[in-house]
Amino acid sequence: MDIRCEHHDGALVARVGADRIDAAVAIQFKDRMREVMQDSATRVILDLSRVGFLDSSGLGAVVAVMKLLGPDRKLELAALTPTVEKVFRLTRMDGVFTIHANAPASLHHVR
Amino acid sequence: MFPAEPLAVRAAVGKLFDHMPTELLSEDERGTAEIVIAEVLNNIVEHAYAGAPGNIDLTLDPTDTGLNCVITDQGRPMPDGVIPIGVLPTGVGLDQPEGGFGWYMIRALSRDISYNRRPDGNCLTFHLPRRQAAFLAGFPNCIGSMTQ
């Protein structure tokens, strides 16, 4: 799964390039995030601006990644698209994560 | 009709929503429909067929109040012959659930869910109502109040 990383203000920003995190790719997402998380940053911001859809498997995978980070590091989410936001809100998991409206600017494409 | 494999399901759902006329469902309603349908289909792949090959039939029928959905498969029956209650799993701190959300979301976003076991398989029907936004705003705490 395409997940690209950049450091921004000491945090690791991981931008997911896939347009869906669902049952078909939940394992690939977790595997790729395991690699990404080998970085030392305590704050990891998951940029989901390109992810148009996430199902319960995708949600579980994001939770699994949060747990893998451990108690001393933090997983935050950014730029949730409408359907993804709906899933987090419906399941009350939006209260579990810090959610940023936008991803850090340096990862945006030049328009 | 499409095979019960994750990527085929995903392609079918994608195609379904790409070609759905925008007058039929608003963008928000499409998001809702996609969530419910994807969850139902995932359950069929994982539990009804449990990796065995088979097909899934999905029929969507627009009505005045929304979309009627009929999904059939030739897989194993639902455990105990009834739809799971779908209690929302919760956690504390880092101890958060990684699963069990599917039926909660299906029930929260649809109406009139009905499951029937037929001689050759399963049939699940449900209704996806229009104007979900107003409903979700007054989202109830107790899952029991939302079942038929």
Image: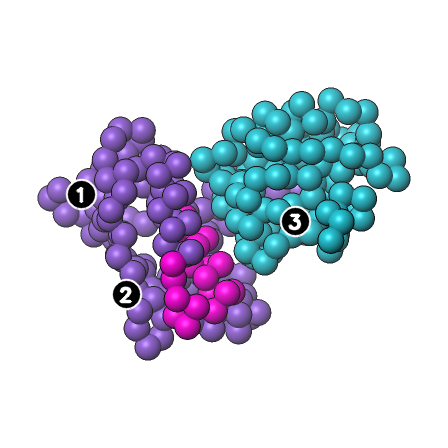
Chain colours: A cyan, B purple
Q: Is residue B24 magenta?
A: yes
Magenta span covers which residues?
B19-38
Q: Chain of mark 3?
A: A
Q: Residue at x 65, y 52 (%)?
A: A80
The quadrant of the image that shows the C terminus of chain B is bottom left
Q: Which numbered disc, 2 or 1, marks the residue that appears first in the sequence?
A: 2
Of A18 and A64, the residue lying toward us = A18
Q: Which mark is residue B111?
A: none
Residue B110's spot in the image, x, y percent?
40, 62
Q: Is residue B59 above or below residue B81?
A: below
Residue located beneath label 1 in the image: B121
Q: Nearer the viewer, mark 3 or mark 1?
A: 3
Q: Nearer the viewer, mark 2 or mark 1?
A: 2
Q: Is residue B33 magenta?
A: yes
- Regarding residue B137, the answer to whether it shows in the image is yes
Q: Quadrant of residue B41?
A: top left
Residue A82's spot in the image, x, y percent?
59, 58
User: SS of the residue at dot 2?
Assistant: strand
User: Marks 2 and 1, Cα distance to the nearest angstrom?
Assistant: 21 Å
User: Marks 3 and 2, Cα distance to the nearest angstrom?
Assistant: 32 Å
